[in-house]
Amino acid sequence: MTTLAALLADPTTLLRRVTVRAPEPAALRREAAAITGDARTVTDPERIAVLQARVAALVLEGGIARISRRDLRESCRTFLNAPNPPARASQIGGALIQRVRETGRRPAFFALLDAYLDGFAIDDEDVRRLAQTLAQIATTWSWRPTDAWRDRIAEFDLLNPQGAPDRIAARILESTDGGRSVLQASGLDVGGRRKGGLVEAAFVSACRAVSTRKVADIEDAQSLLLVWGQEQGTLTFPRAWPDLVRACLLPWATREPTDAHKVMLVEGLERLGGGDPRIPGRGRWSVIASEAPDAHAILMRWLTKASVMQFLEIVDRSLRDGDARRMWSYRRAFWTSYLLSESGARIDQAWVAFGSEGARLARAVAHETGDRSLSVFGEQSEKSSQHAALLVRIGDLLIVDWSHSAKYNVWRRGEGGPALFRQTYLPGALDSAPLRESHHAPANYTWQKRLAFIIEGKRYSTEKPSWRPRRV
């Protein structure tokens, strides 16, 4: 049985025999640094549990005056920490705060401040009460001339849970150095504070300001957020992932960024999200589809246009037979018109499934160019190694068209059909729709017109239509 399990089973008995070893010299140096502004996060849950239980026993016995300086400091530092945070028990927390007031212990006071900055949560009542208490203590505290926290508290309104995140966020978005000077000036740039609760709340506030276009230069602000939101390629604030995605994408709902900025956004989000967002179950993307559907739709629109145009080029290069190239040229023109359409029916999502030869060429081009997006596609064994299938979703329709002589397949909603973004497709998956028609249309009536009727919801027959279809 672990120490923590034993404590939970019988805390009274265990308290009689447990001790906490003294800090080593390195730990002492960190404690001294905490007084001057550095932060140290206590991460040993068993040690915290033992400490909290021992201090709680002293308080309940009326022996708070017997608490050691070390235990007072560490209890303040773990004021909001599980498993039994003193902040959640009014009698325990109140006794500790009163002891800090009475003794004026600087390490304990700054440890309480650490607990607030690290454990900050804007809707947490215990955090709000701690902020009020710290604000009261700060007004009568014996500050030293070298103490920076009195000015920091005032300048950034740090002890106002409702206002501090917005103030810090606004300052960072206005900065010219990515917010480093702001975090340094507010004392939030060291140790665990850089990833603590208050900085996370400021990051969320900044993301929401950008997502609603409350800042003038969107591109610079989005670049700043992508840098701020990661450390060595890893997402710094995982809980803020939906907010970051919204901030990067929602401002482009009705307009387009520059090509360079779009590439930067897509590559940054793919890296932080764990890969290509089109692949089912990949990284953090599943939560975006449900929690930020509008932002997800914008990203999918970008990826559809960019990647399908790239893959169409690869199909062009993979076709050697003259008849096949001629047939594909008509199909490419037809689908490009729906891919780039500004109004009316247009491709919502698209995917390509190559035969083995096209897959080999795509991987070679991805390697040569360094463009990872070219290595993301499906593979099919339905047709020959040179065949490529283009899967498109337009409204309620799922359509599969082919690069060589093969029928196009149409599934309406509720009729099943293959899922997009699969890495492999078995025989029969892409050529078994309820509606399968040849590209060899009757006289005076092309397959483009027939398929356009289906896509745009028009009735069709073997007779020539009275309306003019879109030019392809």
Image (spheres, grey):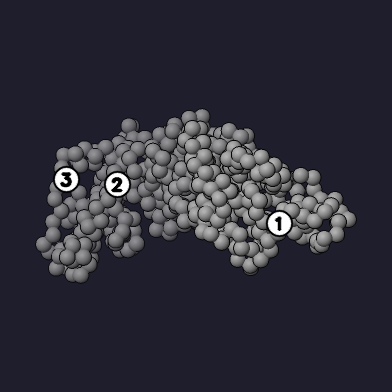
Image position of 290 (left or right of 195): right
Q: Work out how far the residue at label 3 is from the one at label 1, CA to CA, in angstroms.
A: 79 Å
- Kindly identify the amino acid type of the residue bearing the numbered disc 3: Pro
Q: Earlier in the sequence, mark 3 or mark 1?
A: 3
**What residue is drawn where x is 69% and y is 45%?**
327
> What kind of element bears circle 2?
loop
Q: Outermost residue toward the right?
A: 466
Is 95 rendered above or below residue 202?
below
- Specify whether residue 452 is in view: no
Q: CA distance from mark 3 to mark 2?
A: 14 Å
Q: Nearer the viewer, mark 3 or mark 1?
A: 1
Q: Callout 2, which amino acid? A: Thr
Residue 77 point in image, percent of width and height = 29, 50
Residue under numbered circle 1:
438
Residue situated furthest bottom in the rendering: 9
Pick the quarter of the image with the C terminus.
top right
Q: Position of residue 296 (x, y in %)?
A: 57, 51
Image side of residue 354 versus residue 446, left or right:
left
Above-or-below relation of 3 to 141: below
In front of the other: 52 or 292 = 292
Neighbour class for label 3 at 10 Å: few (<14), some, many (≥20)? few
